[in-house]
Amino acid sequence: MQSLPTVLLRPGEADRVLAGHPWIYSGSVLRVTAPAADGDLVQVKDHRQRFLGTGFINSKSKIHVRMLSTERVEVNRAFFIERIEAALAVRRRHLPGATSFRVVNAESDFLSGLIIDKYEDVLVVQISSFGMDKRKALIVDALQKVFTPRAILERSEAAFRKFEGLPDANGLLAGALEEPVQIQLNGLKFDVDILGGHKTGLYLDQQANYQLVANLIKGGQVLDCFSFLGGFALHCARAGAAHVHGLDQSAEAVAAAQRNALANGLAERCSFETINVFDWFKAQTAVNPHEKVIPKFDGIILDPPSFTRTRAAVADAMRGYKEIHLRAIKLLKPGGTLATFCCSHHVDAVMFQEVILEAAFDARRLLRRVATFSQSPDHPILPSVSETEYLKGFAFEVVR
């Protein structure tokens, strides 16, 4: 094995690495012993020259080194095949019936800066680190070996690529693709726009929660807010809801949700509306002085996009969460169920529940918590790497 440049850490900076966190910030670096080009493999040692592992270096990024292993490794085709197969084994163990799921979840699977999503026989790659970007051909070669997919696409357009000194990169990497791709989630069919949809085409992190929520909200009138392609709506309709009304501000998403409802024989029990969810709630809860809002729904689902991507904006986000929960709770019948989610890493579960309870207090409603949710098992959580946990959710029943 070739001799690698050494990144020496400042005193006290090795503890995070020893605890399993893969990011080494530029401020933690004492010096680099030899020239290393951005994206090169380096070895990392503490200030006493004790070996900590190997990773990719990038002088342009605040994350100066992304650790890959606690051992000396060669990052070649065999390396990626081994890591991808290990990640795949985790999914097969925890989501044994799934055919569409996240295969590699970056830091969760010890491949910092690499996400791979599987949509039946089509793979989508998202790369956010310089080191992974330089080895794109190796990654594609490994994926072809492990999966023999119909097509491999790249959707590396995330805003954080610019912090790595990388431009957006989108397009076909291998094979051929005719849009859209039809996938199965829990036995329901969904058409996914992989080239133009959100993220890599779909929010796979809710796959397990779709069914869990549907099992809780089995009947009556259901409201699905931020419905996107109709994931929660269709699962609730199949589980026995009398009617589900979905709201989303994207006309394209609403049209896709309607097609998905039709394809699954659920169109008669589903309706979708293109509208800003906050505006819809304001209109539905507007009453004259001394009048009360009349509850209309047996179940309400709130699955909004992140209200904040920075710690500085958390206060504004909490005001948004409180407003939307206050209005939703007012529209729930006694005994009704609220299923609600937050996908911001900067808002933890304690903060999220507190703002829901504040909204319930203002609405003069008492809630009973009946379920707690997290991201699906194909988005594994490493407690020592807090960034791997972001999705949290609760289900509450309105007691009175």
Image: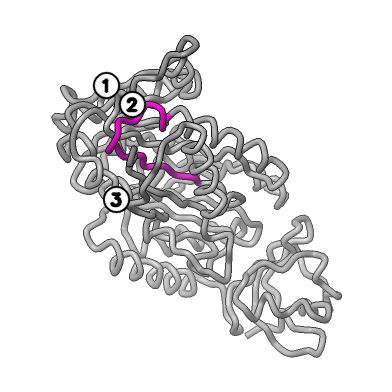
Measuring 59% from the left and 76% from the top, which residue is drawn there?
20
> Residue 353: x and y, percent?
50, 49
Q: Mark 3 points at which residue?
A: 121
Q: Quadrant of residue 317?
A: top right
Measuring 22% from the left and 48% from the top, which residue is drawn there?
186
Disc 1 residue type (three-letter): Ser
Q: Is residue 241 in view? A: yes
Image quadrant in which the C terminus is located: top left
Q: Do the residues labelled 3 and 1 touch (CB within 8 Å)?
A: no
Looking at the image, is mark 3 or mark 1 earlier in the sequence?
3
> Residue 240: x and y, percent?
15, 36
Q: Mark 2 points at which residue?
A: 246
Q: Name the residue under label 1.
A: 271
Q: In which quarter of the image is residue 48?
A: bottom right
Q: Do the residues labelled 2 and 1 touch (CB within 8 Å)?
A: yes
Magenta span covers which residues? 328-342
Looking at the image, is mark 2 or mark 1 earlier in the sequence?
2
The crowding category of the residue bearing disc 1, from other C-alpha atoms within 10 Å (few below 14, some 14 to 19, many at least 20), is many
Disc 2 residue type (three-letter): Gly
Measuring 36% from the left and 18% from the top, which residue is drawn there?
273
Secondary element at tag 1: strand
The residue furthest top is 288
What separation in Å lies between label 3 and label 1 (alpha carbons)? Answer: 30 Å
Magenta span has 197? no
Q: Which of 295 and 63 is in front in this view?
A: 295
Image quadrant in which the N terminus is located: bottom right
> Residue 338: x and y, percent?
36, 39
